[in-house]
Image (cartoon, rainbow, N blue to C red):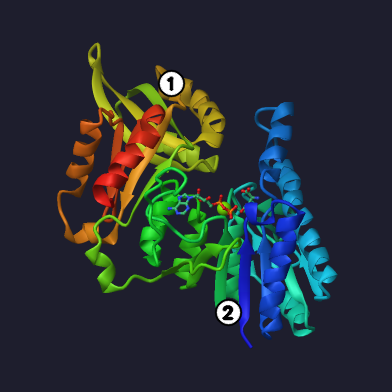
Amino acid sequence: MALIVQKYGGTSVGNTDRIQNVARRVAEHRGRGDQVVVVVSAMSGVTDGLIKLAKQITPLPSEREMDMLLATGEQQTIALAAIALHARGVPAVSLTGAQAGIVTDGVHTKAKIQNITPDEVHRLLDAGNVVIVAGFQGQTEEGQITTLGRGGSDLTAIAMAAALKADLCQIYTDVDGVYTSDPRLAPSARKLPEISYDEMLELAGSGAKVMQLRSVEFAKKFNVVFEVRSSLNDNPGTIVKEETTSMEDVVVRGVSIDKNQAEVTVEGVPDRPGSAARIFKSLADAAINVDMIVQNVSHDGGSRVTDISFTVDKPDLLKASSVIDGLMPELGIRGFATDEGIAKLSIVGVGMRSHSGVAARMFEILAEHGVNIGMISTSEIKVSVVIPLADGDRALKAVHEAFIG
Ligand code: ADP
Ligand code: ASP
Ligand code: MG
């Protein structure tokens, strides 16, 4: 008897027909004698709808109250999924994140899982139930409801699989695997039979929302092998696992685009030790993730000043602006500007470690297509550039075509 964790994302539970489809799949597995833990997201559009409601009231709502609000999305789905299983005669019990033993820190809207005590999950499984766990949510030691960041149901599933020592972890979504690029944007994208944790991490970190970044970090840390596959067909999916040497034969495994970034440029920062530290420490204290950073030194009259540009997730832009605004008098900053019209385009592949000239080739392709590069960052297995948002889709296709075909 195997223990399987299956996660179904928003589209896969988007209406009651889809929820019944999930129940059918789960019932099939259970019929084979397996124990099944199901993690579900909110129905597609529900989380966005709830965020919109709060923002109709105020642009920066309390993060504690946002967690209270957003956690309700997944609670609808767990109950509906349990009802759909009951209708098939399958015993099933739904659990909130807290009831499933998921304990997090207190960073509301981006909480990290501290530990999972899945005693209740085991007890219910042993009594013959399918256990349905609300994705994306947990609870602090003090009993506060938290959420795990957008796309966080992936993390719930991977962490549950690790805590339960599951034999199989399947992420069911609306595509039948991880592709060389988002198949919605690059029609020639191909499905990958397998991908390494490191490549999946870099793709997820650069906009391939098929897996949440933090869930892949967790899977790598605890060596949870998982499969990404479709809830709408039976095609084999993509296995995500530790890399094998043959993976280095491919130079560029995937191309991704992140349109959810915004750029902040802090102008006229006096060039003295500690300024950058103060800025980025203040952003970190506000739980704002900064991605790329570029600094330019210039002269303002007699004194050296710098302009510092960095990117943040679009939903954090308002918060980042208020942090910088608060630092202006103390640091003597001249001003700051924000730009939401950017996109980050990235190429990823473990083969880049052993091949040179890959970045130069990417810049050439962009130049040939008249796309201007704003910022550049690289890692051992990734090259990212910031480009105008309006050029994003065109640039993605051109780069995919040149490297992958
Ligand atoms: P779910 O609601 O199931 O969590 P998401 O919408 O979060 O699903 O993620 C699935 C989507 O990710 C796909 O519909 C696809 O458009 C997008 N995507 C982006 N990059 C890739 C990629 N490289 N491979 C597959 N899908 C990708
Ligand atoms: N419902 C949450 C979101 O939309 C979590 C998830 O779907 O994984 O971000
Ligand atoms: Mg998702």
Dividing the picture into quadrants, the one containing residue 306 is top left
108 relative to 273, above or below: below
Does residue 59 appear in this view? yes
Q: Is label 2 in a helix, a strand or a loop?
A: loop
**Disc 2 versus disc 1: nearer the observer:** 2
- Location of residue 56 in the rendering, given as x and y in whole percent from the top left corner: 72, 27
Residue 165: which disc? Answer: 2
- Location of residue 396 in the rendering, given as x and y in whole percent from the top left corner: 35, 40
Does residue 273 appear in this view? no
In the displayed structure image, the side of residue 36 where residue 222 appears, left or right: left
The CA span between labels 2 and 1 is 48 Å
142 relative to 186, above or below: below
Which residue is drawn at the image coordinates 64% and 56% (left, top)? 12
Q: What residue is disc 1 on?
A: 337
- Location of residue 393 in the rendering, given as x and y in whole percent from the top left corner: 39, 36
Q: Nearer the viewer, residue 81 or 300?
A: 81
- Location of residue 139 in the rendering, given as x and y in whole percent from the top left corner: 71, 58
In the displayed structure image, the side of residue 94 where residue 114 appears, left or right: left
Q: Nearer the viewer, residue 328 or 113?
A: 113
Label tally: 2
Q: Nearer the viewer, residue 222 or 370?
A: 370
Question: Residue flagged by tag 2: what amino acid is it?
Answer: Lys
Q: Is label 1 in a helix, a strand or a loop?
A: strand
| Disc nearer the start of the sequence (2/1) | 2
